[in-house]
Amino acid sequence: MRITKKDVEHVALLSRLDLTEEEKEAYTKQLNSIIDYMNKINELDTEGVEPTAHVLPIYNVMREDEVGESLDREKVLENAPEKENGQFKVPRIV
Amino acid sequence: MNQKYETVIGLEVHSELKTNSKIFCDCTTEFGGEPNTHTCPVCLGLPGVLPVLNKKVVDYAIKAGLALNCEIASFCKFDRKNYFYPDLPKAYQISQYDLPICKNGKLEIEVDGKKKTIGITRIHMEEDAGKLIHQGDKIAEAESSLVDYNRAGVPLIEIVSEPDMRSPEEARAYMEMLKAILQYIDVSDCKMQEGSLRCDANVSVRPIGTKEFGTKTEIKNLNSFKALQKALEYEIERQIEVLEDGGKIVQETRSWDESKGITVSLRTKEEAHDYRYFPEPDLVPLKIDEEWIEKIRKTLPELPNERKKRLVEEFGLPEYDAGVITSSKALADFFDKCLEGYDKPKIVSNWIMGELSRLLNANDLEVEDCPIEPQDLVELLKLMDKGTISGKIAKEVFEEMFATGKKAGRVVKEKGLEQISDASELESIIEQVIAENPKPVEDYRNGKEKALGALVGQVMKATRGKANPQLVNKILKEKL
């Protein structure tokens, strides 16, 4: 499978990245070399090996259902570029 | 509906779990707080924070899975679902993708007396998103939106059905049964108005006899059982019309417009559905052993269908009555509590399905908010049995109790509604009625039994319904 410039544009759109033509070319090349490396790994026999869900062999880390302090609203909105009535104000969505 | 087509419906139901704290942080889940006061760095998605799973969420998801006859996964994990939308501060939702906690369940519904089993594909755990208020009439015209993240991180289970439903009525029955079960097992409030139970419907039509499914559309914004049914009815008609005109159904998301009674296409982008799921690296996987599952199984209460069976077998209620009463846990509890102090099940069921339900509906109240307690109804029924009030007056008293929250005895006393069972008091009234109504009196004496009814009516009128009817009958017959 080869990554084309179109794939890069698609992924860039999904990630909300605005790429220049040069960057698109560069990423197409780089992504292809990553895929090539993956293909090398794909040569390994993974028959009977479970897909990795997590790299650490730890399970069931949980907390009890107890309510704690929430953040002060002033703090919550401190970094908001725009706010109104205690809410974040965001630009037109669609 | 056009007889040439068959409808195929599957439902995706989101239910907020009634934990005290959010799924990955200890902010409260309480509904209705001031905007953004139930938030913290974790549910705001600030950099560097780590989620920690709330154990109760897993307990509740297992409980729901068991109540819906699912297999509980011995191993499951969380995944990131990536998309950009301002209600999602991290730009991904923590959900479960290929290894959900429950799968292969089923639930039984009944429509027009016919039982049917609906498959449940899966149940998975995920976090809820924040709430957006668009500044403008429509989202497409809004210049900006305001975001409240109080709901972000409230635990949800998503319950996905198989495409097993064949009519809007079946979809509604499924949704009602699902709500009842979730309420019985006490894992969710299921308040559709507050959004703690939400539903999206996938619907398609196909010519009868075809094996393949038709192209489906997904309908969102279904906030009540009525909306679900009406939206499906509309959408089915719309799809059939498109096909009959030789057109093709476009796979898309549509929104139910309650005020106009139509579904409208939401602008869709191909890219929007590319969620690029991958395992959530910030959370370790779950191993669920038999011991855990059995511990949860022990907490399962009697479920709606079992309870219905019990009401039929133990109390001799008709199937229909038992079905209505067990459709809501609160209603069934109300019934059971009444029976603790009163031993006539059918009379209690008549009052619950009749007067009580009528007044609740008229006042747009849930059973939980009913101003009349079970023991208040029992008191009223006993007053009726003792002959203190007549059945007709009892309904009047009940309405007053409902409106004011006063007890039956007090209402009867305050309004002077005691039944007149004193023969001498009735006799004088009856003599007067006989004197004033020569025509029915003559008719009755000439053998017209029916004329007695008119005279009884006059006595009741004169006593404003308070006369003991049996006694009136007896005295009238004697006097004539």
Image (tube, coloured by chain):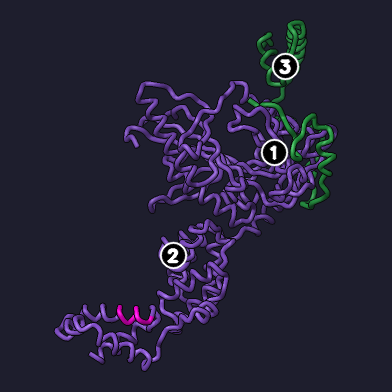
Chain colours: A green, B purple
Q: Are marks 2 and 3 in contact (CB under 8 Å)?
A: no
Task: Kindly identify the amino acid type of the residue bearing the numbered disc 1.
Answer: Gly
Q: Which mark is residue B354?
A: 2
Q: In the rendered image of this protein, does residue B117 appear above or below residue B433?
A: above
Residue B411 visible: yes
Highlighted magenta segment, given as a residue range: B457-463
Which quarter of the image is occupied by the N terminus of chain B? top left
As drawn, is B209 to the left or to the right of B64?
Answer: left
Residue ID for mark 3: A43
Q: Are marks 3 and 1 in contact (CB under 8 Å)?
A: no
Q: In the rendered image of this protein, does residue B447 appear above or below residue B223?
A: below
Q: Picture coordinates of residue B212 (x, y %)? A: 43, 28
Instruction: Tell if the residue under mark 1 belongs to the same chain as the one under mark 2.
Output: yes
Instruction: Tell if the residue under mark 3 belongs to the same chain as the one under mark 1.
Output: no
**Chain of residue at mark 2:** B
At 68% across and 43% down in the image, what residue appears? B74
Residue ID for mark 1: B130
Q: Nearer the viewer, residue B412 or B438?
A: B438
Task: Kindly identify the amino acid type of the residue bearing the numbered disc 3.
Answer: Glu
Q: Of tags 2 and 3, which is closer to the observer? A: 2
Few, some or many residues within 10 Å of mark 2 (<14, 14–19, 20+): few
Main SS type for the magenta part? Answer: helix
